[in-house]
Amino acid sequence: MSLIDVTIAEIIQESPSVKSFRLVRADGEPLGTYLPGAHIDVTAPNAITRQYSLCSTPEAGDMFTVAVKREDDSRGGSAALHELSVGDRLRISAPRNLLGIAEGAAHHVLIAAGIGITPLLSMARYMDVHDIGFELHYFARSAEEAAFLPLLQDRCPEKLHAHLGIPRADQDAVLEAMLAAAPEGSHAYVCGPVGFMQKVVDLAEGHLPPHAVHREDFHAAPLPDASENTAFEVELEDEVYEVGAGQSIVEVLKANGCDVDTSCEEGVCGTCVMQVLAGDPEHRDSVLTREEKAAGELIATCVSRATGPRLVLDYY
């Protein structure tokens, strides 16, 4: 996967724990537009790569903006980025979309908690400019901790519903009321902490069909104990490879010279997704939707396996 050299043109402290980074191409060329809801891989100077949603104006073209929350239990990604300065260099991937605006939806209900505002911010900015019906519900502990709140209050105050300081025990009632009031044909989108997202998905599916509920999740799902793994075969372009109990599909394919892109290798970014032409996947990722997993036509090859003796794959 080719990466793009970028320079940090501006850093803004959006909240006590969140900084936004305005990125421009190091060669001075425009970065181009992207679809709202997209994310990029960001490789810091310490060589750690993480995925961050784009929160700039999708159609601007000249720069990308990502927002990074410094996590107390960071494995080195967010902490390293928070130490950077204007003029420092990074490498990024081209934008990819796991969370996009559903075509044909009558209305869009965006639900964010904390740093989960980032992908929904670009979607809200796009829909506001293009007169697409939406409402944005933003949960945060306080106004001070709600990154981008002043921007949203300035740009789309009539579409914004800021839910500040609501205890977790009281969130269900607020969510239930907003979802019950969603017009027919609505789609809901959620991003935030894992527990919050699962709560929203569970409540939303009581009012909307499963295909109308979308989530953005960059947290890896817990994997079963590797001792439970069994070996199986993978066929790709008429070549058959053995995937051992202690190996991943993508590990075996790359070792045999197959051109498979990877990034997170935790089943959250979608880079390594391939088509399934035959066989039954055992899905262990956090990137495919419930419908995609049920269809069995795609597989995240970095973490998922097979329930049977063989999978036949193709490039996606």
Image: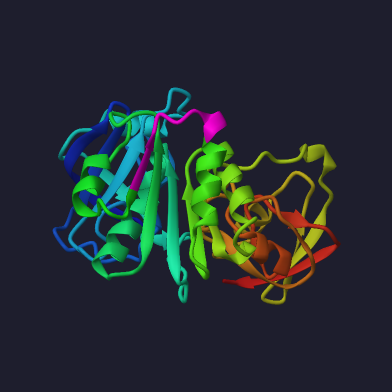
Q: Which residues are magenta?
A: 161-170
Q: Position of residue 243 (x, y in %)?
A: 76, 55
Res 116 → quadrant: top left
Residue in the foreground of this view, choosing between 225 and 151: 151
Can you tell which quarter of the image residue 253 is in?
bottom right
Q: Residue at x 54, y 65 (%)?
A: 259
User: In terms of depth relative to the viewer, which is nearer, 81 or 231?
Assistant: 81
Residue 84 location (% of width, % of height): 24, 32
Specify the quadrant of the image occupied by residue 117: top left
Residue at the image position 78 percent from the left and 50 percent from the top: 244
Which quadrant would the C terminus be assigned to in this image? Answer: bottom right
Residue 47 shows in the view: no
> In front: 266, or 183?
183
The answer to whether one can see residue 175 in this image is yes
Query: Residue 255 location, x and y as percent?
Result: 62, 55
Q: Quadrant of the N terminus?
A: bottom left
Labels in figure, total: 0
The answer to whether residue 167 is magenta is yes
In the image, residue 265 above or below residue 306: above
Residue 21 vs 69, above or below: the answer is below
The answer to whether residue 241 is above or below residue 8 is below
Residue pictured at 28% horizontal, 70% vertical: 131
Task: Identify the image's colour scheme: rainbow, by chain, secondary structure or one colour.
Answer: rainbow
Q: Point out the residue furthest to the top here.
A: 72
Q: Is residue 236 left or right of residue 195?
A: right
* 24 displayed left or right of 245: left
Q: At which x and y percent is residue 217?
A: 52, 47
Residue 8 vs residue 200: left or right? Answer: left
